[in-house]
Image (cartoon, helix red, strand yellow):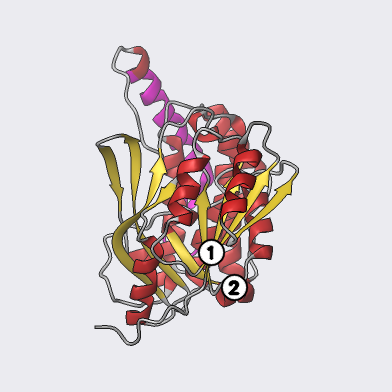
Amino acid sequence: MTKNLKSMHNFSVIVAVCNIDKYIDQCLSSLCNQTYKNLEIIIVDDGSKDRSAYICDSWAKQDKRIKIVHKVNGGLSSARNVGLKVATGDYISYVDGDDWLDLNCFQKLSNYLSVIGDVDILSFSAKKYYRENYTEAIEFNFPEQKVVLGSIFFEQSAFQVPAWIRIYRKKFLENVNLEFLEGHLHEDISYTIPLTYMADKVAYLNDPLYFYRMNRDGSIMNEVKEQNVNNFIYALCFTYKFIKDNGKLTNNFEKFVRNSFYKSCLTHLTTYRILRRNMVFNDVHGMVKHMTVANAFDKSTNLFYIKLFFCHFYILFKYYGGRKIHYNRD
């Protein structure tokens, strides 16, 4: 069935923790009770003010595979970057401390790697968890046991952005030398997409191994603020520049960037003024004027801004007309 079901795949799991004492037990229980035991569990306590640090220390006393780093608060990106510096495994996995894994997660990943061989990135399915008996699948719609270039995977799959829905070969990460952008939201855009384009071998396992907790109290992403808009636009610009500078730019990726800017307009949760201000701040015009795709932004970002305005005019008309409509940024 397999080339060699060896237990030689060493996984490092980086768990970012900050003020989630209601949820961290479930997360760490799902890690410590994995059927696959060859794990290194790195907990980065990002300046928690509640009981999270105490709970993590208690788990560390029970399981010698746990390493804990206590640091001042620097945000999710900072916590992940610190964890990566500590990690020694062959493959890296990111887990948010309020989520959890299927108990067979790493056994299934190890078995699958033994079948397809080592890859730079291995993605898998997940589930959004709203409440008991109410979940929603997150899938890539890509064939299993097919190993392809990262650019092909990005352009032919139903690509999912989150960092936690895949594992990464550590040697590959070291070669690319890309960190999460600290001090920014939407940090996964500027991490997973560039890494995917840099990867020579990407594969997919269609098995829901990760449970992503939805509607958590206190979640940053539950609110839309100007920083959210600014960082979304910045992440797209950073990603475009990184891929271009590394000679991986394709017409399909340019179209993705263009469409992402359009989609960022289609929400009633922000305003035309905020969007335009932050597109100017991040020099979207300067970026897209160099795009090679035909009629990029209809040859002019000025026309793009006009379209953006009318999108909001339409949304406000519907909203105040008594028919409140919702647009999904994704």
Dot placed on the residue nearer the N-terminal end, 1 or 2: 1
Task: Name which residue lies at 28% across and 43% down.
Answer: 136
Quadrant of the image occupied by residue 312: top left
The span picked out in magenta is 290-318
Task: Name which residue lies at 37% across and 68% down.
Answer: 107
Answer yes or no: do the residues labelled 1 and 2 have beta carbons within 8 Å? yes
* Residue 155 in picture, x, y percent from top left: 36, 65
Return the mark for residue 194.
Answer: 1
- Answer few, some or many: residues within 10 Å of disc 1's Cα (few below 14, many 20 plus, some between 14 and 19): many
User: Looking at the picture, does residue 279 appear above or below residue 224?
Assistant: below
Residue closer to the observer: 162 or 205? 205
Task: Name which residue lies at 40% across and 82% down.
Answer: 6
- The residue tagged 2 is 246
User: Does the stretch in magenta take in 292?
Assistant: yes
Residue closer to the observer: 155 or 175? 175
Please, what is the three-letter code of the amino acid marked with disc 1? Answer: Pro
The answer for how far apart the CA atoms under marks 1 and 2 are is 9 Å
User: Does the stretch in magenta take in 287?
Assistant: no
Is residue 103 rendered to the left or right of residue 285? Answer: left
Split into 4 quadrants, where in the image is the C terminus? top left
* Residue 288 in picture, x, y percent from top left: 54, 54
Split into 4 quadrants, where in the image is the N terminus? bottom left
